[in-house]
Amino acid sequence: MSNQDWERVKEALRKPATPEAMQEAAEAYAQYSKVSLGKRNSRPTLVNLGKGTGYPHAVPVDRIPEELATNPEFYNFMKKIVDREKS
Amino acid sequence: MPVSVLMSDFDLPTRSASGFLLRYIAPRVEPIQLYSFFVRRLPFQLSAPQSDIIIGVGHGDKDSFTGQNEAMILEVGKYNPREVKGKMIKLLSCQTGTVLGPDLIANGAKAFLGYVDDYVWVMDSDLAATPWADEMAATSLMPVIDGLNALLDGKTAREAFDTELEGYTRNAGIEEDDLIRSCLEFNHDNAVLLGDPAARVRTRPKIMIPIPPPPIFSPVS
């Protein structure tokens, strides 16, 4: 059921966490989110039970692009969730 | 069967995960339930040795599991083996399956169920007041609940573990959102069972609740 926008997100996250790659991933995710969870009548938030990580415990889905563009730790966190077969 | 349930509740992820335990697990276990402020080291030290199962929700890393406001509960080398010896332990927390889990087994725990990487899911922040009603979070958290119920029903650690994994696979198969599906597959791949897979706890005899009222005897006229 993967769509093209999600494939773009995965492709962008395969690169090392350089500022260019992070920006590309942020843009890809922003495009993807226009047609996914953002449509639901709710406030979806990506959460985790980590401790002492360099990324927040909770990131509203609509703020994922911003976090991807600015936080290399969060970029790598998303990378391991989204693109497990490559990381 | 005495069960220690530790339910931290101080941020969105702990509120969401503990909400599901509060709704689906807490009502069926005997009352050694540490909730919110009471998820701290001292209450845990007092309750754990009396329990057959320890179930915990909290933030964690490779060698520690924490409670309310990240108060330390279990840390490698800093707990009494008496707290874990002979127990089945389930920690809904990040990365505790890498170092802490093996350490708990080495100190006498019968079985450990946890995760070797982060535990992630998507929740609805608008439902923080009623987290158990959150269908988005349920895709990830109900498999955990189903596994715990299997354990409390007397199934083996392996059967309970498989129940949880099957839940992730089933939900991932029907989930339309790519991010949620990725979270389910990620949790599935990182779930780990250590110790004796055949371990099980004795179950209580089933009691029908509510207990029927005593018969009413009307006076014979």
Image (tube, coloured by chain):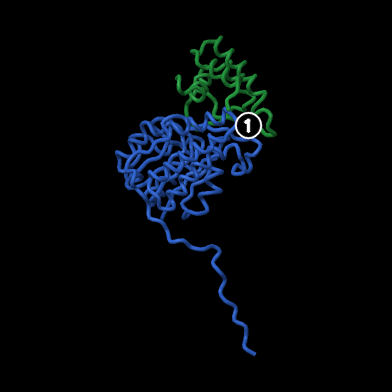
Residue at the spot x=52%, y=28% of the render?
B182
Residue B214 is situated, as x and y percent measured from the top left of the image, at: 56, 74
Quarter of the picture containing the N terminus of chain B is bottom left
Residue at image coords 32%, 43%: B196
Instruction: Tell me the shade of chain B.
Output: blue
Which residue position holds label 1?
Answer: A44
Please indicate, yes or no, whether residue B11 appears anywhere in the rendered image: no
Confirm whether residue B62 shows in the render. yes
Asked whether B89 or B152 is in front, the reply is: B152
Seen at 39% across and 34% down, the residue is B97
Q: Is residue B121 above or below residue A83?
A: below
What is the quadrant of residue A6 in the picture? top right
Chain A is shown in which shade? green
Q: Nearer the viewer, residue A48 or A51?
A: A48
Q: Secondary structure at mark 1?
A: strand
Residue B170 lies left or right of residue B158; in this view the side is: right
10 Å crowding of disc 1: few (<14), some (14-19), many (20+): many
Left or right, residue B221 beside residue B144: right
Coordinates of residue B95 in the picture (x, y in percent): 42, 31
Q: Can you give x and y, in whole percent of width and height, for residue B210 in the image? A: 56, 64
Q: Amino acid at mark 1?
A: Pro
Name the residue nearer the viewer: B72 or B100: B100
The subunit carrying tag 1 is A
Of all residues, the one furthest to the top in this rendering is A20
Return the x and y of residue B193 as percentages of the image width and height: 38, 38
